[in-house]
Amino acid sequence: YYNEQIRSSSESDTQFASIDDGSMTSERENMNQIVSRQMKLISHLESALVRIENKTYGICRETGKLIPKERLMVVPHATLSVEGKKLQK
């Protein structure tokens, strides 16, 4: 959806001279950031699906312990428990 919005705004920019080019550029940059974040999230979720198939979902990659269900409810693609995240720092 956002890629289509970016394309259509680019096409309209070339057809019509915009009075406020800065706002169009800013809007396009915002859409690009949204697309980038969404693609990253999709990639993380696809990796989580692979971990489910491999029966490694919900296991902290740092400590080897189970990630609490509450954390997985908030961040379903988490690969680290809070403890594991602290150890990484």
Image (cartoon, helix red, strand yellow):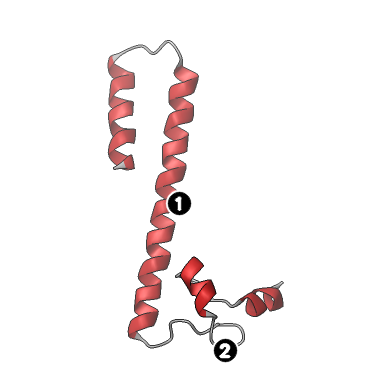
Q: Measuring 43% from the left and 49% from the top, which residue is drawn there?
A: 36
| Local crowd size for mark 1, using a 10 Å CA cut-off: few (<14), some (14–19), many (≥20) | few
Q: Secondary structure at mark 2?
A: loop
- Residue beneath disc 1: 37
Left or right? Give the position of 3 relative to 83: left
Q: Measuring 35% from the left and 69% from the top, which residue is drawn there?
A: 46
Q: Is residue 38 above or below residue 69?
A: above
Q: Residue furthest front?
A: 70
Q: Measuring 66% from the left and 79% from the top, which residue is drawn there?
A: 83
Q: Is residue 20 above or below residue 70?
A: above
**Disc marking residue 65:** 2
Q: Quadrant of the N terminus?
A: top left
- Mark 2 vs mark 1: which is more N-terminal? 1
Please indicate, yes or no, whether residue 75 appears anywhere in the rendered image: no
Q: Secondary structure at mark 1?
A: helix
Give the x, y percent position of residue 54.
36, 86
The residue type indicated by label 1 comes to Arg
